[in-house]
C-alpha cells in the first residue's frame, strides 16, 4: 500500500503533495514502483495533530481523486474518520475505507454497514494502551475482537491494523512487530504501517529511513502481515527481490 498525504503537516512529507498535479504524479509513481493499493489521506494523524474541518479535508482530497479517475489500475483507499468525507470520496472513486478511529466517530459505522467494500480498522485512536502493558499484541487483539463484535460487519470485509505509533511506546511497537501472532489469529488480513515512524529511527538510528522501513516491513510480512503501508515502494520491492525472490 502506497501512501499519498495531501496535508501541509504530516510528519515526514507534509506539504509535498498539496498541489493536485504533484499528487497525481506521486500516485502514478507509487503504482509504477509496485503499489497494489493507494492510500490517500487529507488530514494529518501525526502526534499532536489538529483536526481539520470536513470542508478543508474535501478541498484537498476531491481534486486529486478527480485527476486520478481512469488513470490508476489499483484501488484507492481513503484514510479518513469522517463519514461525510468518506461518502464523498467513494462518490469520486475510492473503493476501500481506512479509518484510524475504527469507525468510532459519528456516522462512520453506519456508512460502513451500507456498502460492500473493504474496511480497515485501526487500534490506537479509539483505545490507547497503558504504558505499562507488556503484552501489547494480545491486548490490541482483544480490543479489536471486541470492536468487530460491536460493529457486526461482514467478517470478510475487515482488515486489521494494530496502529504502530498510535498510543504506544517504542518498546510496545517493537513487541507488536515481533509478535503479530495474536493479531493474525483473529483471521483477518493484517495491515502494518510503520513507514518513517519513530520506531524505525529508534531501531535503526543510522540507516536511511525508507530502506529501514522497507526492511522492517519485510520482517513484519514474514511475521504474518498481509498489507504493508509505505511512503516509498521502490526500496521495499528492491529489498524483497534481493532477500526473497532474487
Image (tube, rainbow, N blue to C red):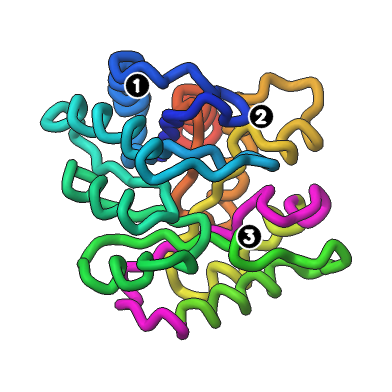
Q: Could you tell me which quadrant the N terminus lies in? A: top left
For image coordinates 70% across by 74% down, the residue present is 139
Say if residue 19 shows up in the picture. Answer: yes
- Which type of secondary structure does the marked residue at label 2 adopt? helix
Say if residue 246 shows up in the picture. Answer: no
For image coordinates 19% across by 25% down, the residue present is 67
Front in this rendered view, residue 220 or 210: 210
For image coordinates 16% across by 27% down, the residue present is 71
Q: Do labels 1 and 3 touch, CB within 8 Å?
A: no
Q: Position of residue 232 (x, y in %)?
A: 49, 26
As drawn, the label of residue 243 is none
| First of labels 1, 3 by sequence position | 1
Q: Position of residue 206 (x, y in %)?
A: 80, 21
Q: In this figure, which residue is indicated by the disc labeled 2?
A: 212
For image coordinates 26% across by 46% down, the residue present is 89
Q: Which residues are magenta?
A: 149-173
Q: Do labels 2 and 3 touch, CB within 8 Å?
A: no
Find out whether residue 181 is within the magenta segment.
no
Q: Where, by quadrant of the figure, is residue 208 drawn?
A: top right
| First of labels 2, 3 by sequence position | 3
Q: CA distance from mark 2 to mark 3?
A: 23 Å
Front in this rendered view, residue 215 or 42: 42
Q: In this figure, which residue is indicated by the disc labeled 3?
A: 124
Front in this rendered view, residue 85 or 25: 85
Q: In this figure, which residue is indicated by the disc labeled 1?
A: 23
Q: Residues within 10 Å of mark 3 (few under 14, many from 20)?
A: many
Q: Residues within 10 Å of mark 2 (few under 14, many from 20)?
A: many
Classify residue 169 as left or right of residue 17.
right
Amino acid at each position: 500500500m502506497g501512501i499519498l498525504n495531501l496535508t501541509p503537516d504530516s510528519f515526514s512529507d507534509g506539504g509535498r503533495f498539496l498541489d493536485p498535479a504533484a499528487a497525481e504524479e506521486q500516485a502514478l509513481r507509487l503504482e509504477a514502483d509496485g503499489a497494489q493499493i493507494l492510500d490517500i489521506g487529507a488530514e494529518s494523524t501525526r502526534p499532536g495533530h489538529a483536526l481539520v474541518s470536513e470542508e478543508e479535508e474535501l478541498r484537498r482530497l476531491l481534486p486529486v481523486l478527480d485527476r486520478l479517475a481512469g488513470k490508476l489500475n489499483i484501488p484507492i483507499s481513503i484514510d479518513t474518520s469522517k463519514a461525510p468525507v468518506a461518502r464523498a470520496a467513494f462518490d469520486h472513486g475510492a473503493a476501500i475505507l481506512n479509518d484510524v478511529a475504527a469507525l468510532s466517530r459519528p456516522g462512520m459505522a453506519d456508512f460502513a454497514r451500507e456498502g460492500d467494500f473493504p474496511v480497515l480498522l485501526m487500534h490506537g485512536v479509539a483505545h490507547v494502551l497503558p504504558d505499562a502493558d507488556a503484552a501489547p499484541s494480545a491486548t490490541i487483539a482483544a480490543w479489536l475482537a471486541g470492536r468487530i463484535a460491536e460493529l457486526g460487519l461482514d467478517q470478510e470485509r475487515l482488515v486489521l491494523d494494530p496502529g504502530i505509533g498510535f498510543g504506544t511506546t517504542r518498546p510496545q511497537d517493537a513487541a507488536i512487530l515481533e509478535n503479530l501472532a495474536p493479531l493474525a489469529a483473529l483471521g483477518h488480513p493484517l495491515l502494518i504501517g510503520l513507514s518513517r515512524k519513530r520506531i524505525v529511527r529508534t531501531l535503526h538510528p543510522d540507516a536511511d529511513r525508507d530502506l529501514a522501513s522497507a526492511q522492517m516491513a519485510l520482517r513484519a510480512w514474514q511475521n504474518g502481515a498481509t498489507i504493508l503501508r509505505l511512503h516509498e515502494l521502490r526500496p521495499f520491492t528492491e529489498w524483497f527481490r534481493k532477500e526473497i525472490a532474487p
